[in-house]
Amino acid sequence: MDPESIRAADRVPHGGETDPNVLDFSANTNPSTPDGVTDVYTDALQESRRYPDDDYPAFRTAAAEFVACSDDRVVPTPGGLAAIRLAMEIALEPGDEALVPYPSFGEYAREVRLQGARPRFVRYDDLTGLCEPALESTALAVVCTPNNPTGDAIDPDDLAAFADRCGDAGTTLLVDEAFLGFTDLPSAAELGHEHVIVARSLTKLFGLPGLRAGFAVGTGQRLEALETARRTWSLGTPAARVGAHCLRDEAFVTETRTRVERERERMREALEAQFDVHPSDAPYILCGVGSRDVGSVLESARREGVAIRDATTFRGLESHVRVAVKDRDRNDRLLEALGVRDSEGEGGSERE
């Protein structure tokens, strides 16, 4: 990282509720975790008196199987954001330019700036349509699929075509797939291009955001750079063991995808009565509040014991909130807090 840029950097706001008495719909995490996690964690904790095996063979194999690549292409990281930073550390130098989508995850621009590089903001739904003239002066392009906070995923063919254009222009492409596991879409890891780096987070899909487990996927010289730059013992033993256990639970992943798709559609139909709802492939829904004040919507929900995400902190959004998709009971509590009914007549009553 660039020392001068660090001194000028700011923190980025995020969702996440620390009050255990408040139902948290501001963070997009699974309300369920795979069976057996507690036992695996307990056993791993007993072994944490030794340093972990820095090769992480079991974790690499499970991660590789999950995204359909060879295990020697997996680079373990303490969460998806650590994979993003690692990719930017090897791809950017001070003075470089990076294409950053908006509205999207605020950490992209922050991490670009920490490297002393300059973010150039492009509408997230326009970015993958850029051609070589717009890419030739760019060291790095970032895409997020499904995009956060809008929720729409990039068509795999469109992403592959954009990856080809990035390769022709000599631009590194970083694909953030933090929420792709909630869909059945293929990972960009399957492209196998040397200029493409994939960042994955385990903790959202498996409901363990505090565990901090993730990985990057690379090829060729960029993979060698990722592996060299990776911190030694980059995963604690509990994170590596629990992460591998979760990645192998295919039944849990299938059930989660089915539930999220079903509940997202039910919530969308209910929310459309009062909000401008953005189409989503993700475990969250972006809602425009229209002429209402975002702060009043947030405060009203919180009085009912529910926290939702203030989406005005995302670049380009001035009148939006974002709500997570949980399980049916929790989702019903959200709908009640927002004063809407679902298509089956359940949820909250209309507010006078």
Image: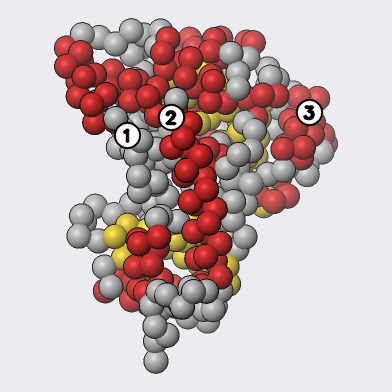
**Which comes sooner in the sequence, label 3 or label 2?**
3
Residue 148: percent from left, percent from top: 53, 49
Residue 266 higher or lower than 346, as above or below? above
Marks 2/1 in contact by CB < 8 Å: the verdict is yes
Q: Which numbered marker is on residue 339?
A: none
Q: In the depicted view, which residue is nearer to us: 154 or 103? A: 154
Residue 273: percent from left, percent from top: 54, 78
Q: Which numbered marker is on residue 35?
A: 1
Q: CA distance from mark 2 to mark 1?
A: 9 Å
Q: Which numbered marker is on residue 249?
A: 2
Residue 181 higher or lower than 219, as above or below? below
Nearest to the eye among marks 3 and 2: give it.
Answer: 2
Residue 70 higher or lower than 37, as above or below? above
Image point 37% across, 74% down: which residue? 336
SS at mark 3?
Answer: helix
Image point 60% across, 39% down: which residue? 184
Marks 3/1 in contact by CB < 8 Å: the verdict is no
Tell me if mark 2 has few (under 14), some (14-19) or many (20+) residues whose alpha carbon lies within 10 angstroms of its own: some
The amino acid type of the residue labelled 1 equals Asp
SS at mark 2?
Answer: loop
